[in-house]
Image (cartoon, rainbow, N blue to C red):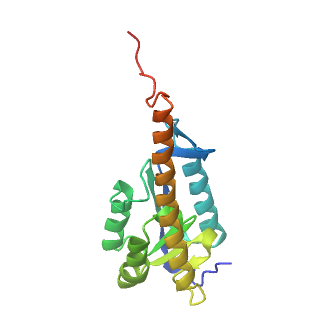
Amino acid sequence: MITIANPEKYRAGLYERLSNENIEVASGEVIVSKEDELESGSISTQKIFNENFCKERNIFIYDHYTDDGVSGATFDRPDFNRMIQDIENKKINMVIVKDLSRFGRLSSQISYYLEEYFIEKGVRFIAVNDDIDTGNAESSEEITQFKAFFNEWFLRDTSKKIRNGKKTRAKEGKVMTTYPTYRI
């Protein structure tokens, strides 16, 4: 369990992210469904989860940084960049995510932020569900690296399955496009 001593010294940035496609890989068939309705349900869930974590520990929430519809394979995301700018401007000194995969999926970039950038800037990073807390010596660096590696592997594995699924559908002569949004 993550405990916070002196919560009043922190100004938290709560980061939420979800890719724009909800991918289901089942029995060799790939189904890709857009999540265009309002704000993604998972984003709302992440926001509530992160807010509750802060409220239970009396941590001041400075702002939410939400990239809805952006892949974790890139770190060039609009609200992620805004969060980094707020770190540079010393507006926040804590970043909270529901789990490490919401922060990103590339282990090298995750390592850079957790092991270099956040330390250099005096920012405490917490991935709640993964029990990762850079402000706690018991939060294992090895576990963080393993989870980052696993998240990247998952990204690559899913990508491979999607490509194979598309090839299979094409060979079977199945339609590979969506329906047009207009009528003639």
- Residue occupying image coordinates x 40% and y 17%: 182
In the rendered structure, the answer to whether residue 181 lies left or right of residue 45 reads left
> Does residue 20 sit above or below 95 in this rendering?
above
- Residue occupying image coordinates x 54% and y 84%: 142
Quadrant placement of the N terminus: bottom right
Q: Residue furthest front?
A: 171
81 or 100: nearer the eye?
Answer: 100
- Residue occupying image coordinates x 60% and y 89%: 138
- Residue occupying image coordinates x 57% and y 66%: 99
In the rendered structure, the answer to whether residue 130 lies left or right of residue 63 reads right
> Does residue 112 sit above or below 32 in this rendering?
below
In the rendered structure, the answer to whether residue 46 lies left or right of residue 79 reads right
Residue 27 appears anywhere in the view: yes
Please provide percent x and percent y for residue 59: 56, 71
155 or 16: nearer the eye?
Answer: 155
Quadrant assignment, res 66: bottom left
Residue 14 appears anywhere in the view: no
Please provide percent x and percent y for residue 30: 54, 41
Quadrant placement of the C terminus: top left
104 or 1: nearer the eye?
Answer: 104
